[in-house]
Image: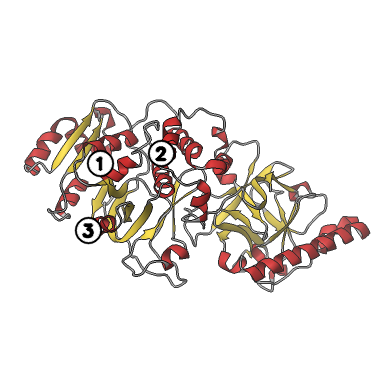
Amino acid sequence: MRTVFSVVNRSPPFLLKEVILVDDGSTQGMVCFVLFMVSELLLGHLSDYVRENWPDGIVRIVRLQKRTGLIRARLEGAKAATADVVVFLDAHCEATYRWLEPLLYRIHQKPDAVVVPAIANIDRFTLKVFRTDVRYTEDGWLSLRVGSFAWDGMFIFEHPPRSAVTKRRSNTDTIESINMPGGLFAMRRDYFFKLGGYDEGMEVWGGENLELSLRIWQCGGSLEFSPCSTVGHVYRANHPYKFPGSKDYNGYNTARVADVWMDMYMDNFYLARGDLKGTDHGDVSTRRQIRSDLRCKSFQWFLDNPAAHKFVYSRNRLGYGSCCTTEGHCLLRGNDGSEYRKQTMSLLLTPSRVTVHSWATLFALTDTGLLRKDWNCVRLRRAGGPLNSVWVFTPHIVDLEICPLEELEEPKQREWWRAWVADQMKRIEQRQISHPEQGFQAVQTTNQRGAHFRWLYDKIHGKLINAQTGYCLDGIDGQRPTPKPCVDDAPSQSWHFSHHG
């Protein structure tokens, strides 16, 4: 009930028409630990509790006879609402002071805007709210995180691209986002249903936030985060209730999203969720009809406009998909950090015969020599710190670091890279003719800016050669890839992508 109290107590009475609680078929079997008292209230006394605390009727309950899941429960709440604007909030939230006014003001300015508050983390043990400090960092990034998605459909945070930041006229303006977290947003009720509400073919939970986000953008609206509105949210370690059966509901739902909204780019989804390819995800004809009726734009438009910064694995790449040695060891992103900018992550190996969530093994090699995992790039560095002039005498490792794209992708850098690659491949070919056993030792290293991020790739032999050191990526130990002197016929240095550009 903390959520309800915070919404009622911290919203101007003339702006708040009603608070609707949706009881999604709660049962005593759902009681757990700190939620015990709340669960007991839901079972028998919630109606009395609501009447005693809000006799004016501003808080009311919608009870569902059986558990339908988060998606359909929210839809029932929206159907029951009578106000012009609906604000969807998870039950484990806390509204802060002056949280509502910025959301409503932006929707008043732009009726087809869907607005998400800045989200503050609430410690699930102490319930302390950690407010979001919205400011510009030293390197020019806005500290407020907005929404994005991994190609498996999961929500991730990111700092907004510079293009979204620079179009703002003041620090109080909203910031465009390509995805929403799903549990905290405001929009006009009529616009919600004009867009088609939620996909009623989805089951229980998952994927509804991405589906609605793509629909908002592709069908003429905008999705924005407000830096002036803050709502706290408890990020739970697990779900406090059980789902029927053992079905992968999130996978089922996101497959529906890819089928309806991603057009030819849904192959990127199936690169990340290869286990779902060819599986049944229900009838999507109604959702396709909504897209047609609203004359929604293509996914290509989405990638060229609000999501222009989004990395697409299958577009103009030398190779993409899983990257494995001929010995059967594949690159794997370490699970030691979230997908936030300025986050360094480990790079590991996994046997190709072992079934892993395929998004973690999804990489792409660009035509500028960057071995990328979304906005992270594989780089070579000295074990004790940055790569420098003494690299020959110190051990060095490879890991994943934020790609300095503005530096590495500028036109002059691209021109230099193409010329350097052509020269090195010519050197390798000449050396293989005169000294076959030393062909790949002919690479002339460079101290060009960002060279430790760049990898020369020979498709025939599968060598991935670091431009700054001339070392080859080696997977011999089966645990972590390491840079080592190139050996022509070493199977642990022969890398091949599952797809080629």
Residue type highlighted by circle 3:
Glu
Q: Earlier in the sequence, mark 3 or mark 2?
A: 3
Q: Which structural element holds mark 2?
A: helix
- Residue 172 seen in the figure: yes
Q: Which residue is mark 3?
A: 101
Q: Earlier in the sequence, mark 3 or mark 1?
A: 1
Residue 350 placement (x, y as % from top left): 62, 43
Residue at x 42% of width, y 42% of height: 211
In the rendered structure, find residue 34 and report the number of the disc placed on it.
Answer: 1
Specify few, some or many for label 2: CA neighbours under 10 Å numbering under 14, 14-19, or 20 or more.
Answer: few
Corner quadrant of residue 246:
top left
Q: Which residue is mark 2?
A: 293
Residue at x 12% of width, y 54% of height: 14
Q: CA distance from mark 3 to mark 2?
A: 33 Å
Q: Earlier in the sequence, mark 2 or mark 1?
A: 1
Q: Which structural element holds mark 1?
A: helix
Left or right: where does residue 395 sit relative to residue 229?
right
In the rendered structure, find residue 412 and report the number of the disc placed on it.
Answer: none
Above or below residue 15? Residue 408 is below
Residue type highlighted by circle 1:
Val
Residue 174 placement (x, y as % from top left): 34, 61
Left or right: where does residue 436 sit relative to residue 62?
right
Specify few, some or many for label 1: CA neighbours under 10 Å numbering under 14, 14-19, or 20 or more.
Answer: few
